[in-house]
Amino acid sequence: MADPRELPQQVADLIELAKRYLRQETVDPLRRIGQSVGRAVMAALLVGLGVVMVGMGLHRFLAEALPKGQWWEVAASAIVVVVFLLAATIVARRVRTDSE
């Protein structure tokens, strides 16, 4: 049987052990998950910004390359929309194929 004078030290050790266990099993994994989510959100924002820039650049290029006129501006916009719809379709099919 343990000495009654050791009981406070054992209780303190038990509390410290419980704190370390909770930190190891809850806080640390949540911190790692939070970092992963933060990186994923940042990557998604940067990819989205890149897509917008490419779209603007493609539209500007087509507006300069095609003859001048209001309908040619509309044609340039339509071409950009079609190109991005095709790209989105290809990406969606690849994602669906990879997940199956």
Image (cartoon, rainbow, N blue to C red):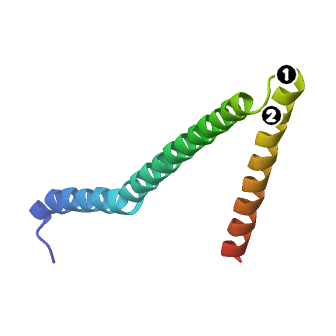
The residue located at (46%, 55%) in the rendering is 33
Q: Which of marks 2 and 1 is nearer the N terminus?
A: 1
Q: Considering the numbered disc 2 on the image, is that residue within a helix, a strand or a loop? A: helix
* Of 1 and 12, the residue lying toward us: 12
Marks 2 and 1, how far apart at CA: 13 Å
Residue at the farthest right position: 71
Judged by depth in the image, the label closer to the viewer, 2 or 1, is: 1
In this view, the residue farthest toward the front is: 67
Please tell me the numbered disc located at residue 59.
none
Check the picture and name the quadrant holding the C terminus. bottom right
Rendering coords of residue 4 (x, y %) = 14, 64
Residue 1, above or below 20? below
Disc 1, SS: loop
Q: Which of 17 and 24 is in front in this view?
A: 24
Q: Which mark is residue 77?
A: 2
Q: Residue at x 84, y 29 (%)?
A: 72
Position of the N terminus, as image quadrant, is bottom left
Q: In this view, does 54 lie above or below 86?
A: above
Query: Crowding near pointer 1: few (<14 within 10 Å), some, many (20+)?
Result: few
Label 2 crowd (10 A; few <14 / some 14-19 / many >=20) = some
Task: Kindly indicate the quadrant of the structure image that contains residue 93.
Answer: bottom right
Q: Is residue 82 left or right of residue 58?
A: right
* Closer to us: 53 or 5: 53
Where is mark 1, residue-wise? 69
All told, the count of numbered labels is 2
- Seen at 73% across and 29% down, the residue is 63
Question: Looking at the image, which is closer to me, 78 or 1?
Answer: 78
Classify 70 as above or below 16. Answer: above
> Of the residues shown, which amino acid type is indicated by label 2?
Ser
